[in-house]
Image (cartoon, grey):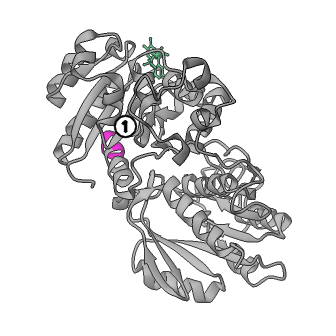
Amino acid sequence: MANGARILLIVGGGIAAYKALELIRELKRRGHESRGVLTQAGAHFITPLSIASLTGDVCYTDIFSLTDEAEMGHIELSRDADLVVVAPATADLIGKMANGLSNDLASTTLLATDKRILIAPAMNVRMWLHPATQRNVETLRRDGVTIVGPDNGEMACGEYGPGRMAEPVAIADAIEARLKAGGNIIALPPETQLRPASPVQSPPPQQMMSRANPKVASVPPRILPGKGPLAGRHVVITSGPTHEPIDPVRYIANRSSGKQGHAIARAAADAGAKVTLVSGPVSIPDPAGVEVVHVESARDMLAAVEKALPADIAIFAAAVADWRVATASKEKIKKGANGPPALALAENPDILATVAKGRKRPRIVIGFAAETQKVIEHARAKLKKKGCDLIVANDVSPETGIMGGDLNAVHLVSADGVESWPSLPKEEVAQRLVRKLAEAFRPA
Ligand SMILES: Cc1cc2nc3c(=O)[nH]c(=O)nc-3n(C[C@H](O)[C@H](O)[C@H](O)COP(=O)(O)O)c2cc1C
């Protein structure tokens, strides 16, 4: 399915619109066809002609354009693709999508589509971190929209932080992962099957709006907190890196972004669980509906996990530093004539083994193993040594782009054997993992 897919690319009005042109090229290089929709604001940044030239197709801009509607109306446009992609997804488009608004071709197409949607947000860091945007993004995640990025970095406006659109290659990777994951059509509930419009079958307008006609008005049920397959379960999850202080201003860290652990926390909350997320220092927002405990070091993380127990499930996705500086200096270490200081290291507590072998062991304990070689061999050894039920192993060699990236290719290593999943968006990995947990807790 990933080969030769048809992508409907909606380009919003942001500085990153120029990268949409590179995305079209990248998709073409990979054998996919694109068709473009450009918002009015988008047309201030790039021209419809650039998109049309690269896609080899009309670039659609206006919902009331008779020509376009004659060639392809917005409903057909929204359905005649394998995946709908929004890049850049502006704060405005995200807000419209989250609230079901449709006042132009892009937003109407997004509301009318029966296809999966992937968005690549791009905006100023403050716009991205604004609670309104974060609320809207959370709503979209819950609606099943795949979100790629944004990346951290310097913005065109000179500020630094999360908000840069993911690079076209990363978006194309996520598009292929989304296509491979399947389920590209969003089915309506059986009672709302679409029927061809006919004067006899169409209910009168007032009836379509009426609550007295739930068959027409109903939408696919969304899991509410407290409901769902993990309702009544407590899940403790660790995420992100740890920072091990050298002195008050310096620390030892690693490249973990927290994206995978946070996605699992979100997916578990969506499945109705009570979730405690113990997060190391990350630059991504706290997931909604989750109790988040922010910590710095491995020792703080262990203390927070122990405080959060008892739990039914513990998932240790954090990249905990194996070592810390044995005695961190209370004052900033000064550069001196004696050359660089020698840093004596001490081993950090093993959070996974401590909990898996501890008195308050949750029924299911899952560890993560980030390896750069012999991934499965090391995961098998870790499974035995730590006493957990499952190791989620991945290859974090720099060329995989997994550490800090949006995709993950994991192997589930348990006493039953190894199950390998293809490269998937981290949200998708999280949802699959939570579905497995839900199966384990399903009443016999
Ligand atoms: C120079 C300039 C750059 C902008 N960059 C962004 C951006 O990167 N992200 C964003 O969400 N909005 C950005 N905006 C604001 C949007 O263009 C504005 O909200 C617009 O209404 C979005 O329309 P659309 O969502 O229909 O494309 C920018 C505006 C200007 C004038």
Place residue 13 in its image quadrant: top left
Q: Which residues are magenta?
A: 167-171
Q: Amino acid at mark 1?
A: Val
Which residue is pictured at 38% across the width and 49% down the height? 174
Would residue 439 appear left or right of 75 to someone viewing this image? right
Is the residue indicated by label 1 positioned so its CB lies within 8 Å of ligand 1? no
Which residue is pictured at 32% across the width and 32% down the height? 9
Above-or-below relation of 40 to 76? above
Residue matched to label 1: 84
The residue furthest front is: 200
Above-or-below relation of 431 to 222? below
Residue 100 locus on image (x, y percent): 55, 26
Is residue 304 found inside the magenta-colored segment of the image? Answer: no
Residue 330 locus on image (x, y percent): 78, 54
Q: Main secondary structure of the magenta part?
A: helix
Tally of numbered tags: 1
Q: Nearer the viewer, residue 155 or 408?
A: 408
